[in-house]
Amino acid sequence: MRTAIAVAVIAALTALAQAQDAPYKDDRSSAGNLIQSYYNAVNRREYARAWSYFGADKPAPDLDSFADGYSTTESVDLVVGNISSEGAAGSTFYQIAVAIRSTEAGGAQQVFSGCYTARLANPQIQGDPFQPMHIVEGSLETASEPLEDAVPPQCGDMPPDPAGDPVMRRARELFEKAYGDSCRGMPGGNSRPEPESHTIEFRYDYDDADAPTRQARLVQFYCDAGAYNEIFVYYISDEIDGVRELHFASPDLDIRYENDDFEGAVEEIRIIGFNEQNRLVNSSYDPQTYTITSHSKWRGLGDASSVGTWLFRHGQFVLVKYEVDASYDGEINPEVILDYYSAP
């Protein structure tokens, strides 16, 4: 019995020594550093320090209860993802996407992912005692390996901070490499506006109906403008394929006019095949209907044009509707030549 106790004590002291070998990190200069410091304290078994990173709303009734929650935790690996921020009533709130791998006594491991919320009250208007940046709350759920892929793409509805957003950063890199020279930006030499970003929740067609929803990120870049058309480029990111440029299926049309005169009446519009395009004209994304639309004006009057609609279905955008107004007659009278919008 004494031997077993001695072995247990030696093991505990060894684990404690290994934990304390981790470099000390106590940094509240950013939301990401705050979360890293919190788990650094957990790994070093400095539970009072970990407890201090929370504000008035603590995650446990008291410090002893908080420490007991980590009594079987040997170590925690952390990945910090996208960080978003928003100002409100003299404070800045941060949403931090994270994934952790917890290793328990005996070697069992479990991955969790979720979001932390942090708050920094304006330091210039604070008094005594001063309240540094602190954790307001955290919410984690079980997830799957690999750890890096378990990080949520975004937390909350706050606009993503490009500096802390790996998806946006990668999309910018791909866009600049492919279109940095050809996409000139706004008319008059003005710089391009900031790209739009949308989070899309979905399930693949092979997912169970009660399976957790997946997330994709859609990023829209402004490319160029002409006399009456603006051009956009899209990128998408998901957990399987990462960040990639979107290409859109489009019908190849055979349009026939009376007497082969474009000013004459339209005799026939036929789809003779399909191609793909990587730039959409006068385009936008509707988060309510999960659709991207493109409205290409063939001339300034807008009386001749084409309108495409692509629906996000089971993890990808598919062409579901296409309308063409091929008559240069001064009137807007498009003809629907393809319509799968009602397909299940």
Image (spheres, helix red, strand yellow):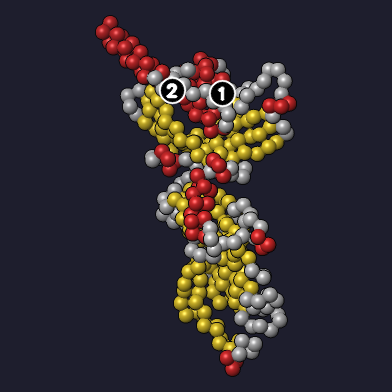
Q: Residue at x 57, y 27 (%)?
A: 28
* Residue at x 61%, y 27% (from the top left corner): 133
Q: Earlier in the sequence, mark 2 or mark 1?
A: 2
Task: Tell me residue 126's x, y (percent).
Answer: 71, 24
Look at the picture and state if 335 lies above or below 3: below
In front of the other: 228 or 191: 191
In x, y percent, where is residue 212?
A: 48, 45
Disc 2 residue type (three-letter): Pro
| Outermost residue, top side | 2
Task: In the rendered view, tell whether residue 197 sits above or below residue 128.
Answer: below
Residue 173 location in percent, x, y? Answer: 50, 51
Q: Are marks 2 and 1 in contact (CB under 8 Å)?
A: no
Neighbour class for label 1 at 10 Å: few (<14), some, many (≥20)? many
Side of 129 relative to 135 (left or right): right
Quarter-wise, where is residue 34 in the image?
top right
**Which type of secondary structure does the marked residue at label 1 adopt?**
loop
SS class, disc 2: loop
Residue 44, above or below 185: above
Residue drawn at the location 44% of the way across and 20% of the way down: 44
Q: Mark 1 highlights which residue?
A: 53
Q: Give the quarter of the figure containing the N terminus.
A: top left
In percent of width and height, residue 245 lies at 48, 58
- Compared to residue 261, the image places residue 5 above or below, namely above
Please give the label number shown on residue 148.
none
The residue at the point 63 percent across, 65 percent down is 225
What's the distance in space between the residues labelled 2 and 1, CA to CA? 18 Å
Q: Amino acid at mark 1?
A: Tyr
Is residue 134 at all visible to an observer of this figure? yes
Q: Nearer the viewer, residue 278 or 216?
A: 278
Identify residue for label 2: 23
